[in-house]
Amino acid sequence: MILTIKKIPKTYWSSKKPLNFKPKISTFLFLCLGLTFFGLGEGLLLVSSTGASPWSVLAQGISLNVNYSIGVITFFISLFVIFLWIFLNEKPGIGTILNAIIIAIMIDISLALIETPENYFYQILMAVLAVLLVGLGSGFYLIANLGPGPRDGLMTGLQRKTNLPIALVRVFLEITVVSIGWYLGGSVGIGTLLFAFGIGPAVALGLFLVNKFFN
């Protein structure tokens, strides 16, 4: 049932439109909660030392070559992606801006405060937990409906411009960024694969749980 979800659920705290710059307090708080979970998940995946999500591989690779943290690089990547929206006729919402800020902060907090488990089994367990947290966070921020994340907007904008299948556009973006990040020294491993294959079901689970318990 969870994997058959086709639409983003609506709740009493969902914004009626993405470009809503005066959302309800509950909508705003749930959005921030979701992005906090999302950023924590991204950070834990990096901490696990099993690999990283494609965009975090890129941020990590760039970070290794300049004197900035992975979180700061993540923020600058998000700003650059949002800048590209100008050419794709995309419009950022509150969720778009907060996505760039909160996720970047949570990545650096995670890397600073959480230690990598010494046991490889616990590293994998941390990676699985990380993917689930990103999925849960996605559930909150997608249902809040206050604008897509920078990368999601890039994906949908490119799809409209090229008229290619959205899955093909997403795969092209993910492969491109992870390849550049890996070339620059970013960490690619079992955690990257767990994210690639697990994030879809994790987001579906997140949508289901948020709709069921926070409706």
Image (cartoon, rainbow, N blue to C red):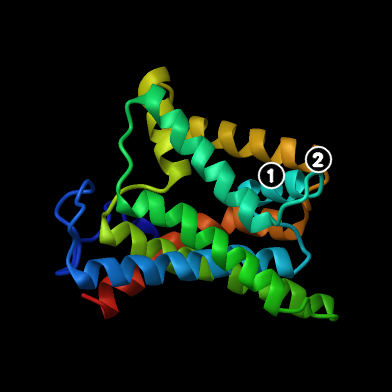
Q: SS at mark 1?
A: helix
Would residue 201 be visible to someone looking at this image? no
> Is residue 173 found left or right of 166 in the rendered image?
right
Instruction: Report if residue 187 is visible in the image.
Output: yes
In the image, residue 77 sits, relative to residue 157, either above or below, namely below
| Residue indicated by mark 2 | 184
Which is more toward the observer, 214 or 28?
Answer: 28
- Tell me how many marks there are: 2
Q: Distance between the Cα atoms at labels 1 and 2?
A: 8 Å
Residue at image point 62% right, 71% down: 109
> At label 2, which amino acid type do we have?
Leu
Numbered badge on residue 32: none
Label 2: few (<14), some (14–19) or many (≥20) C-alpha neighbours in 10 Å: some
Q: Which residue is drawn at 56% across and 58% down?
A: 104
Question: Going 63% across and 57% down the picture, which residue do you hit?
Answer: 71
Q: Which of 211 and 79 is in front in this view?
A: 79
> Which residue is labeled 1 in the image?
58
Q: Earlier in the sequence, mark 1 or mark 2?
A: 1
- Under mark 1, the amino acid is Leu
Question: In the rendered image, which quarter contains the C terminus?
Answer: bottom left
Horizontal and vertical percent position of residue 62: 74, 43
Name which quarter of the figure residue 184 lies in: top right
Image position, residue 201 (x, y; %): 48, 60
Q: Pointer 1 and pointer 2: residues touching (CB < 8 Å)?
A: yes
Q: What element carries label 2?
A: loop
Q: Residue at x 47, y 64 (%)?
A: 135
Q: Nearer the viewer, residue 142 or 101?
A: 101
